Structures are given as structure tokens and as C-alpha cells.
Image (cartoon, helix red, strand yellow):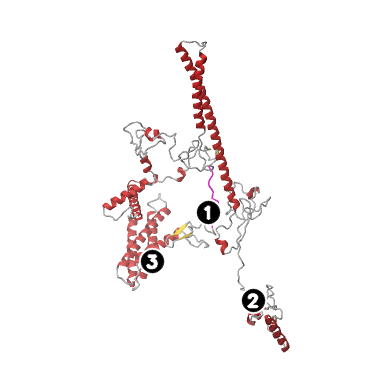
Amino acid sequence: MASSAVADSFTSREDDKKRKQLQEARAAGTAAPETDEATGKMINPHNPEFITKAPWYLNQDKPSLKHHQAWNAKGLGTKDWYMRGTKGDVKTKFIKGACENCGATTHTKKDCVERPRAVTAKQNGKNLMPDEYISDLQLDYDGKRDRWNGYQPEDYKQVIEEWEKVEGERRRVKAAEMEERAKLKERLKAQKKLLKKKRKLRRRQLRRQAEGRDEDDTDTGDSDTGDSDTDTDTDSDSEASDDEDLGEKMRDFEKNTSTVAAKDDKLRTTTRNLRIREDTAKYLLNLDVNSAYYDPKSRSMREDPLRHLKDEEKGTAFRGDNFVRHAGDAKSLTELMCFAWDSYKHGEKIHDTAQPTQALKMFEVYKNRAENLKKDQQKELMEKYGGQEHMDAPRELLFSQNETYVEYARDGRVLKGTERALEKSKYEEDVLIGNHSSTWGSWYDATNGRWGFACCHQCMKNSYCIPIKKRDEEENAAVQDAEAAGGTDPATGSGDAATGALRDAQEQVDSSASEASSSDNEAAAGKDDGKDEETKKKEKEEKRRKRALEGIKLFGTGAAAGPAGAGDTPASSSAAAEASDEKDKSGSKL
């Protein structure tokens, strides 16, 4: 079937006959089957031709079944993990493009996790850090979801070693304490023996004085022997008791796991949940019978036994069991419960135990309402009496005081000490984009909800800056006010006529104002010699412009209110202009 995998070509009748005979022999098992050229495996001779034959456009000359494999099949993934640590390479010179802070070439200054240096690696070229391992792993499905992937058992050995060190130190301290305790008991036993010996001598002397005998009597030996016998008995008893004291041991839970009720007298267990014996008992803090009551059954003293003292004198002493009950969240829980009771009395369906979430939400609303009421009252007081500038102290004054001594000269130079260093961020600040004079995000468009530039009021970050002038804004505002005063009527078109009339009236008023100002200036030149002509001219022009604007506004409101058509607008505008001229003339005469 080798020829079946080859592209179709012209074959003779004898070749076809030989191919069929070979195919029948392979199917019968008398001839060796074909082998796959890609995998080296045997191709089943019973496969039909449409399976073993490859398409003509693949140009597959040798027998193979690789054309059945998916052309876009992905390779097997990996379960490896990222390599930790650094490569350990030693750098002697700063490389261009590396991190300016530490000198590593695998990250930039913005992504550096090292401490920011005062003198960076780019400046001095010293202490250059090695590069980290950068690996791109193609994790498979199991590798991505394996929670133990990358776990290293060697890391847990550090935890084990740490605990072993702590346990060894604990055993050492415990052995030292036991040794110190044994030495102390030996010292106490020696002191007891010495004290008993002194007492024995003292009793002997008293007995001799009572019997009237001297120290040189012959009977002293018998008495001494008798006393010594009795003393030795007592000494032996005391020594036995001391030995029993020395035999007391703390139960070691690692070596002995016997129960508490052990029959061994030398093994005594202690209860750890009782109070420390060095602490003073509650009922001994105040011996007054009229002080706080102590319940011996429950071992509780609810009231403060030292309430007659000041807080400074109490210190960290016991202040009663109720003191702990009113600390922490207990106070807020009590307030919530009282609020639920009061609300239920006033008809609200609320219960702090059945519906705790609803009760807590209603309590928060109540507190917020009370806080808002206080804020409103404070705001009213500020509006009435003032003083808001004293409430908000400048941040520079609040945080400018410190304990460092700095002495300045009159010109601002530092004479003694170090000047306060300003904090700097590791990120770039005040970076201007393009030809803008303000930073991105310095202006906010409230209508569209977008950030932009304050210099041109544009919301596109890559836009070209066209600065906004104050004069253009004032002119636009004046035109908008005039249009709003004139109004529009889409049916009759009176709005357009009114707008044109307003413009004509403004031009006439400006021309008449200029003429009147020139005549007034000529007339007043002889009278007011002290004043400057240019300043007087400017003042009069400003007055004329103000009057013209007032006339425009009045005319605009009249045009919007009246039902006049477009033909009446010029006449009314000329009348308004004449009226304004008369006012100007009368004003100039006055």
C-alpha cells in the first residue's frame, strides 16, 4: 500500500496488477505490512484506501498516517514551577537599560522592590544586584490548579528547626530553674540545721540554769546524751520532711502520662487554671465590711473594691467584674438593645434578637440623623457668627513642629542643624503631556463624568492644547445671556428677529455713546483741566457700555414678552437707541 499513499500518477496495467497482488499478500499475512514513516509503527493492511491515502496537496511520498493528526494540536503542558532566587552573576559596571536603583537588568526602576537608595546604582555603579530568573511556563490544566505546585519541603525544615531550638531553650531554662530550686532547698535545709543547733544549745543552757548546775558537772554527759537522742530524732524527722519536699516533681507530660489521681506520693500535679498565688485575692483588697460584696460560691466580686481611690492611685489593680462587662463591644450592644426597646414602645416593629440586622441598620440611620442634625446646627452657627477659617488649621502648621533644632539666617540660609527633607514619591509627578500647561486629571467635566486638562478643558489625553482665554468666555457668556433674554419662537421666527434687533441696537448704542463721549470730552476739556482726558474718556465709555447692556436686556425681555412680529423689531430697536442717547446727553449735561 505504499503506492496508495503517493499522489495520483500514471501507472501501467502491469504495475496495477503487481500492486493489487502485494496488497492481497499483506492482507493474507504472507507479505510484511507497511511501516509508518513518522512513528515507525506497523500500518494495518486491512485499512481501507481512503484512510491510508493522503491528500494530493500534502505531497506525502512515503506511507504514513500522520495526516490524521490535528494540525493545531497543543503540546503537553508542564507542572514545573518558577525558579526562585537570582542567577548569582556579579556585575562590575552599570549596564545601560538596567534598573537605576539596584542595577539588575530584569526589571526597571518603577518595578524595583529594593529599598530606594539615596545614591542609586546608576550614579556610583556600586553594589549592583544580580538578575532574577525569568521563566515563561506553559502550565497545563492540572499544573494551573495544583495547590501544592512549587512547594518545597526544605522550607518547612526551617520551621522544624526553629521549634526545636525553642523547645531546647525551654528545657534548658526549666533545668536551670530546677537546679536553682534544689540549691535553694539545700541552703534552707542548712539554715534549719543551724537554727535547730542553736535552739538545742539554748535549751541546754536554760535547763542547767534551772537545775543550778555548772557546765563542769559530771551529769552533763547523761543529759547531753538524752538531749542529743531526742534532738537527733527531731532532726531525722525534719530531714525526712525535707527529703519529701525535695521529692516533689512537676509532671512532665512528655515522659509520664499518668492521671491526676496518681497514688505515687512523690508525683504531685498542679492545676494551671487557678489564679497566680502571688496575686492578692479579691476579698483582701479592701477589708471594710461595707465595701464590695464577694460571693465565695462563684468567686465573683461585681463592684469595684477600690472605688474610694482615684484612677491614678488604682493603676492596674482589680476594678470589679462589671468593669470588664462594660468594655469592648458590650457597650454598643447595650445601646442597640435600649434603642430597640424604645423604638418598640413608640410603635416600630423592631426586635434586636429576632431581627438583629434590621435593628442594627435602623440604629445606624438614627445615629447618622443625629450627627447630621449636629452638623446642620454647627453650620447655622458658622453662617451666623463666622469663624470657619479658625476651624480648618493649615496642614503646614499642624505637622511643621518637631524636636529637631534648626537655626536660620535672615536671608533663609541654614546656619545650624539640617533642614527638613521633603518626601518624594517613587512615581513621576507633574509630567506635562504635549504642549499642555497643566497635568492630565487637573480638571473634571461634571456633565460627562470624565477627567481632562485644566488649561484647555479637553478630555482626550492625546489632544492638542488650545488655551481658553477669559475674554472669549466673557463674550460667550454675554451672547448666551442675550439669547436667553430674547427667547425663540419656532412658529413665527420672532426669536431670530429679536436677536438681530438686539445686535442693531447694540451697534447704535455704541456709536451714539462714542459720539456723545467725544462731545462731552470737548465740552469738559476747559472746565476740568486737572483731570486727565484719557482716564475720563475710559470712564465714560465704561458707563455708556453698561447702560447699553441694560437697555439690551430690557429690550430683550420686552421682545420676548410682546407678540410683535419681525417687522416691528427694527423700529423698537431704534426707539431704544434714541432713548439711550437722550439719557447719555442728560447725564453729560449734569
Residue for badge 2: 67
- On screen, residue 505 versus residue 439, left or right, reads left
Q: Position of residue 223 (x, y in %)?
A: 49, 16
Residue 431 part of the magenta-drawn span: yes
Mark 2 vs mark 1: give the one in front. 2
Q: Specify few, some or many for label 3: CA neighbours under 10 Å numbering under 14, 14-19, or 20 or more.
A: some
Task: Determine if residue 54 is in view.
Answer: no
Mark 2 and mark 1: Cα distance apart in space: 61 Å
Dominant secondary structure of the residues highlighted in magenta in the image: loop
Kindly report the distance in space between the C-alpha atoms of the residues bearing marks 3 and 2.
84 Å
- Residue 253 position, x and y percent, is 51, 42
Q: Earlier in the sequence, mark 3 or mark 1?
A: 1
Q: Secondary structure at mark 2?
A: helix
Q: Is residue 256 left or right of residue 571?
A: right
Q: Is residue 479 visible?
A: yes
In depth, the one of 536 and 64 nearer the eye is 64
In the depicted structure, whether residue 424 falls above or below residue 456:
above
Disc 3 marks a residue whose amino acid type is: Arg
Residue at figure coordinates x 36%, y 47% from the top left:
332
Q: CA distance from mark 3 to mark 1?
A: 45 Å
**Count of numbered labels shown in the rendering:** 3
Locate residue 410, reporting x and y percent: 52, 38
Highlighted magenta segment, given as a residue range: 420-432
Given residues 509 and 230, the one toward you in this image is 230
Which one is earlier in the sequence, the residue at label 3 or at label 2?
2
Furthest residue toward bottom: 13
| Residue lying at 31% horizontally and 33% vertically, measured from the top left | 290
Q: Which residue is mark 3?
A: 503
Disc 1 marks which residue? Answer: 430
**Callout 3: helix, strand or loop?**
helix
Q: Quadrant of the C terminus?
A: bottom left
The percent coordinates of residue 484 (x first, y second) are 36, 65
